[in-house]
Image (cartoon, helix red, strand yellow):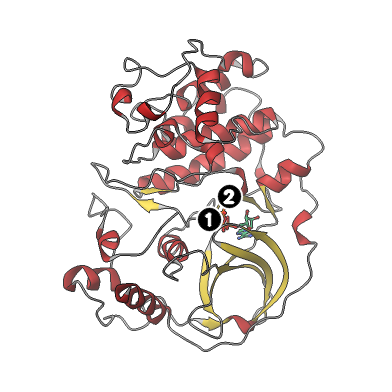
Amino acid sequence: MSSSLTSNELEANPAPDPQAPITRKGFLISLKNSGTPMPIPEQNLYGRCRPVAEFEKLNRVGEGSYGIVYRARDTRNNEVVALKKVRMDQEKDGLPVSGLREIMILKQLKHENIVRLREVVVGKSLDSIFLVMDFCEQDLASVLDNMAQPFTESEVKCITLQVLRALKYIHDRYIIHRDLKVSNLLMTDDGCIKLADFGLARMYSNPPKPMTPQMVTLWYRAPELLLGCKTHTTAVDMWSFGCILGELLLGKPMLPGSSEIAQLDMIIDLLGAPSESIWPGFSELPAVQNFTLSQQPYNNLKTKFSAIAQAGRNLLNILFIYNPNTRATAEECLNSKYFIDPPQACDPRMMPTFPQHRNNTAPQQAQTSADIPISDLLNVFIKRQRMD
Ligand SMILES: Nc1ncnc2c1ncn2[C@@H]1O[C@H](COP(=O)(O)OP(=O)(O)OP(=O)(O)O)[C@@H](O)[C@H]1O
């Protein structure tokens, strides 16, 4: 991904509803009004950052494209937290853009099925920042990789209902996650699912504005993205959600393509070929000419999910709709008969617990740092980018 934080981007995609709970204030508005970084009117907009030295790193639990995540102990209150070090070396201009986006978005979200950002802490230089989040004992990818038997259907319903609640919450606030996959679904020992990793998330507007299509991990990527559509909607998350539901029901990834064309072929093998009649505008999509799509005419969802009750297959059918404008929304899924029919979703507290496979690495030394306001940090990054 080539990404840089520009004032245009900060201004882009305003929430269409001025009453929406998400507001843009502080430094964002300063940039918009002046075109250059301005002093931040509210001192310490995001509060003062504590030094990361106040956290004892216990072990590394994960590493993604944009950061390393540690289990750590907050020495002030002894609580165990997740500490995500924002990776700096991936950005060509040295800016932790995905980290900053993640901070800006997570700060505004408060929902029991979304990982809570407690605070931002800093290392010894401004080039080292960490997100402090509630610690979740598991992520669904490592659970699925290590479990002896697949989830029962009532466990699948328990997990997916929680994911849908998180999706409804963010979609109602004009936020698209854009990287929904099992490794970004965390689970606590109380069976609570938390949507994590908002590094690729974006605000969207109506009508949608152009965005980079190469988002979303391939296996969970919607056909409109694979075909180069530049206007994304919440429907991209709903496709990914369908892939996750399918993966939980099958006990293995549903569409594990190894390239974009292989991914499209897998989708077509499962659902039949898209056409202008079922997806108006399909033939105009930028990448349609680049691929020779197979003409397989049948929808094979029923065969692939023959062990699942009709209501489950109906839910999958409305998620795997090619046309993003008619694909099911999170709210429609929450009202699906699938969640009413037996077996009903189990209580999260009845979910099985799993060994913590991610806790096997050695402790790390904490760094020292200064006590710096996060607003200063953000200004430094923005200024640096303007100089490039
Ligand atoms: N709050 C948390 N509690 C426990 N583990 C976490 C937490 N946040 C992240 N992790 C672990 O760290 C991994 C990577 O985190 P995350 O997805 O946020 O990083 P990323 O660099 O953005 O990853 P990606 O490459 O998927 O975009 C997760 O899959 C999970 O295993």
Cα–Cα gap, marks 2 and 1: 6 Å
Q: Is residue 59 left or right of residue 89?
A: right
Do tag 2 and tag 1 residues touch (Cβ < 8 Å)?
Answer: yes
Q: Is mark 2 within 8 Å of ligand 1?
A: yes
Q: Looking at the picture, tell me which residue is in the foreground, 387 or 116.
A: 387
Mark 2: which amino acid?
Asn
- Residue 154, labelled with which disc? none
The residue depicted at 65 percent of the width and 58 percent of the height is 136
Q: In the rendered structure, which disc, 2 or 1, sits on the residue that comes first in sequence?
A: 2
Query: How crowded is the residue under tag 1: few (<14 C-alpha within 10 Å), some, or many (20+)?
Result: many
Q: Is residue 172 left or right of residue 16?
A: right
Residue 303 location in percent, x, y? 62, 13
Q: Is residue 69 left or right of residue 216?
A: right
Residue 227 location in percent, x, y? 39, 32
The residue depicted at 30 percent of the width and 80 percent of the height is 42
Q: Is mark 1 within 8 Å of ligand 1?
A: yes
Residue 182 location in percent, x, y? 61, 44
Q: Is residue 158 above or below residue 268?
A: below
- Residue 197, labelled with which disc? 1
Q: Is residue 189 left or right of residue 292?
A: right
**Residue 345 in sight in this render:** no
Could you tell me how many numbered marks the image carries? 2
Which element type, helix, strand or loop, lies under badge 1?
loop
The residue depicted at 63 percent of the width and 49 percent of the height is 192
Toward which corner of the image does residue 145 lie, by quadrant?
top right
Which element type, helix, strand or loop, lies under badge 2?
helix
- Residue 184, labelled with which disc? 2
Quarter holding ligand 1: bottom right
Farthest residue toward the left? 33
